[in-house]
Image (cartoon, rainbow, N blue to C red):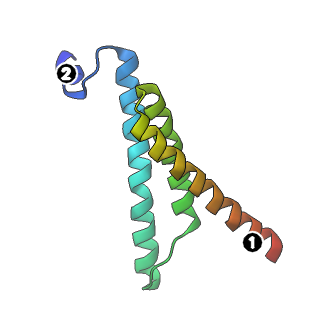
Amino acid sequence: MDKVFAVLHVESWTEFWWVVFGLFGQLMFTGRFLIQWIASERVKRSVVPIAFWYFSMAGGLILLSYAIYRRDPVFVLGQSLGVFIYARNLWLIHHEARENA
């Protein structure tokens, strides 16, 4: 396990699990692009499905948590803004759906 810790630049199991958590967040964040691409290919035009925003929010919150744990001000600032934008887009989508119901 020492080699894995060295590759991940961690010194404890706590740090190891935070890196695993951060990697999961990055996978969620990357998954949103796959969702958008597949949805666009299905209809043969560019679309942004609601799942894109949910994956963005989940990945963004996980990565923000990871950045806070790592005390990385650049990463914290970047993810904070993103989470705000994703939340706003989800609010707009749900607000529109309520108005049209």
Label 2 or label 1, whichever comes before in sequence order: 2
> Which residue is depicted at the point 45% across and 59% down?
32
As drawn, 16 above or below 50: above
> Considering the numbered disc 1 on the image, is that residue within a helix, a strand or a loop?
helix
Q: Amino acid at mark 1?
A: Glu
> Which quadrant does the N terminus fall into?
top left
Dot 2 surroundings within 10 Å: few (below 14), some, or many (20 or more)? Answer: few
Q: Position of residue 40 (x, y in %)?
A: 44, 77
Disc 2 to disc 1, C-alpha distance: 49 Å
Look at 65% across and 58% down and name the residue there.
88
Residue 38 % position (x, y): 41, 71
The residue drawn where x is 25% and y is 27% is 8
Instruction: Give the total number of marks visible in the rendering.
Output: 2
The C terminus: image quadrant: bottom right
Q: Which mark is residue 96?
A: 1
- In percent of the image, x 40 and y 62: which residue is there? 33
Q: Mark 2: which secondary structure?
A: helix
* In the depicted structure, whether residue 48 falls above or below residue 54: below
Residue 44, x across and y down, in percent: 42, 85
Tell me the residue that label 2 is attached to.
6
Residue 86: quadrant of the picture: bottom right
